[in-house]
Amino acid sequence: MSRRFGEEGRELSYGTYLKVPELLSLQRGLSQEHDELLFIVAHQVYELWFKVILFELEAARDRIAADDVFFARHHLRRVNVIERLLVEQIEVLETMSPQDFLAFRSKLAPASGFQSVQFREIEFLSGLKEPKYIARLEVSDEEMGRLRKRLEEPSVDDAFQALVKRRGSPSLLEIFRDRERYGDLFDLCEALLDHDEAFAHWRARHVLMVERQIGSKTGTGGSSGAQYLRGTLGKRFFPELWDVRSQL
């Protein structure tokens, strides 16, 4: 009897391919509180999705630089779907009551979501480059190198601006007013804005979750907590794509 596909050798399995035993060994809490496992898993999942977002944004930037708008939009579409998933994931964290979170929160200091290197990489790679954050982060030399690289390399916004210039369009306004001529550029503008808007939704939803969990308490990393987060709600990766709406 002939063997079916995948049965030869049997050297690979679901668990060995995905490193499941290693993955499941990484949820090591600092307390015996029931909800700490949920807290750890949710944030580890965020970091895994951040890794995919960075991978797709790099691909989108490189496709834009190569005048391949079709596949750039494909990568940006995937980014947008993941970001909407991240917004929905906040509901899982909100199944913790404030009391349940406070039962182990004190053990987390001075760790803070503010220290997420990949989160900053997403901002820098998208186009929101703010070097001041580097001086405030306590990270490894390898992580600092990644952040500096993101500041120095072209962003998605840089690639987009260069593409518009190569196409000979003098302004975004012309792209929006003449979609018949610049249809692919207009669609790319909207895909970029989808990424920007989805990330803004995540910021806003995250603030509400923090307020629901800790009110006006300071953050574990020493920030002002929800007050600091509210100050970030106006951040945009592509402000010119928002401003052009006022000119139409």
Image (cartoon, rainbow, N blue to C red):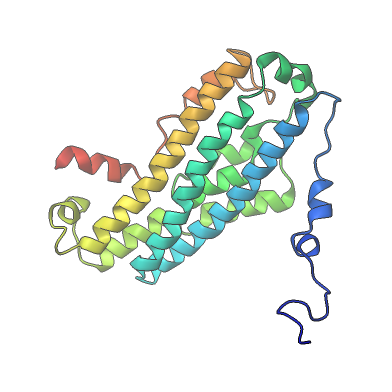
223, 2: nearer the viewer: 2
Q: Residue at x 77, y 28 (%)?
A: 36
On the image, which quarter does residue 73 sit in? bottom left
Residue 90 in picture, x, y percent from top left:
57, 32
Q: Is residue 134 visible?
A: yes
Query: Is residue 202 left or right of 51 when viewed as pictured?
Result: left
Q: Residue at x 30, y 51 (%)?
A: 190
Residue 153 in picture, x, y percent from top left:
51, 59
Residue 96 in picture, x, y percent from top left:
67, 22
Query: Is residue 52 left or right of 26 when viewed as pictured?
Result: left
The image shows residue 146, relative to residue 10, as above or below, that is: above
Query: Is residue 71 left or right of 22 when viewed as pictured?
Result: left
How many circles with numbers are drawn on the protein? Answer: 0
Q: Residue at x 53, y 51 (%)?
A: 151
Query: Is residue 167 left or right of 33 when viewed as pictured?
Result: left
Q: Residue furthest front?
A: 1
